[in-house]
Each structure stands twice: as structure tokens, then as C-alpha cells.
Image (cartoon, rainbow, N blue to C red):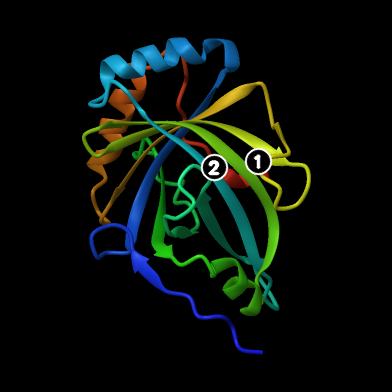
């Protein structure tokens, strides 16, 4: 059986391979409004963008080494917009001079047949979740504050429960390779969010 056709388009201005600089932290539910108030004062958009997304994580297991992982995400609040397909490379965490985690990022828009296409290509869904929250922007910096929820019945995004009593906070920027000064800008911005949230350079391998 042939894989269903799927169309993909770059999301970031014709260049699909970029470097992502990332800092992460969390804030308890009861401190959310205080954090949002601080972000409204620091960021360009006083009223943040809101989102509700469904993300599916797919794995392709090879003969050896780590499985190949892709993330497919669709908007629940705008179901007609394209899906996003994302590949995140191995993080470069060894450089102590960098204040942020750095990893290669390939991000494309895809048609709604993406899940069927990935299944036909041999990928299998590992897990899925719903993310709802707010997006703030400060120049090229992006701050995402999101509540993550597990899906109790596969593919039923109405039947969920929160993963924790906190919100995930991510400060990130997508830029071409070699712009390490961005990590200093991110560190300076993160300092302004203390003590409400402590954003750190987190190695995902330590939490696996």
C-alpha cells in the first residue's frame, strides 16, 4: 500500500533548518497570574496569543542507536490550519559558555494526512498530549506558558487530565547557526522573571 500524499512547506521564511536556543522552567498554578502580569510588562504584546494544540510524538526504531523522533502538532482551536511537523536534533549542552540549550530544529507545515503518512512510512506513535496556554514575544524571543495534559482515551482530545499542578515555561529563539550571543540575551531576559520562575538550561537526557 502506498503512503498517502502529504505536502510540506517551510515555516520560517524558506529556511527549514535552524538552531533553537532554549531555557525551561515551571510555575505553580497559583502563581500563573503573577507571571502573566510580569510578562505583559516585559514583552511586546501586552495581550498574549492563546493556543490549544494536540501533539503526537512518533518514533522510528532502527537496527541500532537511538530511535528517530518526530513531533506532529495540530491546532484544536483552528482545525483548518496546517499541521506542524518538527524534528529536534541532539542538544549541544557541553559548552559551558552558552547560557541556553542549543539544538538543531527543522520545522515544516504539513497537510492533514500527516499522521497516515507517518504510519505508512513505518513510524509509530509513542505518546500524545494536549498543550494549552499563552505565547508572548519580545523581539525575536518567544515565551510559551503552557499547561500539559495527558489524553486518557487515544485521540480523544476532550478527555484529558493535567500532568501536574504547574505550567511549563519555555523561553526560546530560532536563528541560523552561529548566533551564540542570543544565549546572553536570553539569560538577561530570564533574570527579569526571577523569582517568579527560574529558567534553566536543562539536558533532556537527564530526565529520561
Rendered location of residue 157, percent (x, y): 66, 44
Q: Residues within 10 Å of mark 1 (few under 14, many from 20)?
A: few
In which quadrant of the rendered view does residue 81 lie? Answer: bottom left
Please state, as top left, top right, bottom left or bottom right, where the N terminus lies in the image. bottom right
Horizontal side of 74 relative to 194 (left or right) equals right
The answer to the question of whether label 2 and label 1 lie on touching residues, with beta carbons closer than 8 A, is: yes
Rendered location of residue 7, percent (x, y): 42, 74
- Judge whether 101 appears above or below 19 on screen: above
The label number, if any, that marks residue 203 in the structure image: 2
Instruction: Quickly name the residue at label 1.
Output: 207
In which quadrant of the rendered view does residue 139 lie? Answer: top left
SS category of the residue bearing label 2: loop
SS category of the residue bearing label 1: helix
Could you tell me if residue 66 is visible in this image? no
Rendered location of residue 17, percent (x, y): 34, 63
Horizontal side of 64 relative to 88 (left or right) equals right
Could you tell me if residue 158 is visible in this image? yes
Amino acid at each position: 500500500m502506498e503512503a498517502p500524499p502529504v505536502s510540506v512547506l517551510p515555516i520560517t521564511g524558506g529556511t527549514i533548518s535552524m538552531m533553537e536556543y532554549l531555557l525551561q522552567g515551571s510555575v505553580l498554578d497559583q502563581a500563573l497570574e503573577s507571571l502573566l502580569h510580569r510578562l505583559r510588562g516585559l514583552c511586546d504584546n501586552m495581550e498574549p496569543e492563546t493556543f490549544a494544540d494536540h501533539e503526537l510524538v512518533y518514533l522510528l526504531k532502527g537496527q541500532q542507536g537511538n530511535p528517530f523522533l518526530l513531533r506532529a502538532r495540530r491546532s484544536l482551536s483552528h482545525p483548518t490550519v496546517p499541521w506542524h511537523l518538527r524534528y529536534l536534533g541532539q542538544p549541544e549542552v557541553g559548552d559551558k559558555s552558552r547560557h541556553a540549550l542549543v539544538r538543531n530544529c527543522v520545522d515544516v507545515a504539513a497537510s492533514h494526512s500527516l499522521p497516515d503518512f507517518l504510519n505508512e512510512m513505518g513510524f509509530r506513535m509513542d505518546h500524545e498530549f494536549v498543550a494549552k496556554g499563552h505565547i508572548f514575544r519580545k523581539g525575536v524571543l518567544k515565551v510559551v506558558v503552557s499547561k500539559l495534559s495527558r489524553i486518557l482515551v487515544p485521540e480523544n482530545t476532550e478527555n484529558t487530565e493535567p500532568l501536574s499542578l504547574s505550567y511549563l515555561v519555555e523561553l526560546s529563539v530560532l536563528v541560523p547557526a552561529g548566533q551564540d550571543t542570543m544565549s546572553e540575551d536570553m539569560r538577561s531576559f530570564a533574570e527579569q522573571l526571577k523569582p517568579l520562575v527560574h529558567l534553566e538550561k536543562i539536558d533532556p537526557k537527564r530526565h529520561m
